[in-house]
Amino acid sequence: MRSIFYIIGAIVKFFLDFIRWILGINHSNKKYKLRKYSNKERYQFLENKRIRNGYKKGWLYYRCKEEGLMNEYYKYNK
């Protein structure tokens, strides 16, 4: 009996996610929230996140590349 509810729940979740995808609703994506800040603030946020989570320098390079912050990356990593 439980497995039926799990299957129904999975199907409902799939359709809700599909509708969100069609409408372009994605509340968990922080990448687009960063765009309202200046480039320096965006770089500092990524640097702090790198330090906080223990990521290597290469992570910051590729994230700056994705975000279009390569000028700031080279400016602060001479």
Image (cartoon, rainbow, N blue to C red):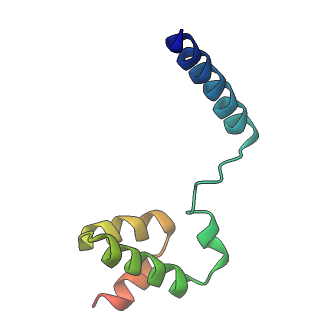
**Residue 38 in which image quadrant:** bottom right
Relative image position of residue 55 (x, y in whole percent): 27, 69
Q: Residue at x 32, y 70 (%)?
A: 53
Q: Residue at x 45, y 84 (%)?
A: 44
In the image, residue 5 above or below residue 30: above
Relative image position of residue 24 (x, y in whole percent): 71, 44
> Which residue is more in the foreground, 6 or 25?
6
> Which residue is more in the foreground, 41 or 69?
41
In the image, residue 60 above or below residue 26: below
Seen from this angle, which residue lies furthest right? 23
On-image quarter of the N terminus? top right
Left or right, 34 with respect to 48, comes to right
Left or right, 24 with respect to 56, comes to right
> Which residue is more in the foreground, 76 or 41?
41
In the image, residue 77 above or below residue 65: below
Relative image position of residue 26 (x, y in whole percent): 65, 49
**Residue 6 in which image quadrant:** top right
On-image quarter of the C terminus? bottom left
Q: Residue at x 63, y 80 (%)?
A: 37
Relative image position of residue 4 (x, y in whole percent): 56, 10
How many numbered marks does the figure carry?
Answer: 0
Seen from this angle, which residue lies furthest front? 1
